[in-house]
Amino acid sequence: MLNKFGPSGHGEAQVQYLDGDFRVISPGTFVRCAITDTRIPLDELKYWSVDLQEAYATPAAVLQRHFPNAPKPQN
């Protein structure tokens, strides 16, 4: 439910994570990954936890949060 026509901030947004969507509570241009602290532009936000109310930059960050003791993939 990102309102692209409302007022926008230039810093970190405060977001409520919902099932399949999110609501911007306080305007901003990005949120931070809970695992890596990477800035995630709101228009690129794809991964989050409704239960934990936190965002993730990548699928690997999601796995790291939910399975912290899992072995890391070998490259």
Image (cartoon, rainbow, N blue to C red):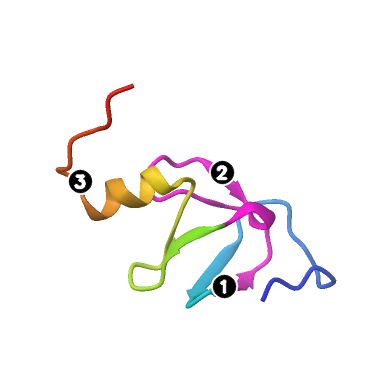
Image-quadrant location for residue 6? bottom right
What distance separates the C-alpha of mark 2 from that of mark 3?
21 Å
Q: Could you tell me how far apart the alpha carbons at marks 1 and 3 are, in whole angstroms?
A: 25 Å
Confirm whether the magenta stretch covers residue 6. no
Residue 27 position within the rendered picture, expressed as x and y whole percent measured from the top left: 68, 65
Task: Determine which residue is flagged by label 2.
Answer: 39
Left or right, residue 58 beside residue 41: left
Which residue is found at the position 56% from the left and 43% from the top? Answer: 39
Left or right of residue 7, residue 38 in this image: left
Q: Residue 44: which disc?
A: none
Residue at image mark 3: 68
The label shown at residue 22 is: 1
Given the image, on which type of amino acid does mark 2 rest?
Arg
N-terminal-most mark, 1 or 3? 1
Q: Secondary structure at mark 2?
A: strand
* Residue segment shown in magenta: 21-45
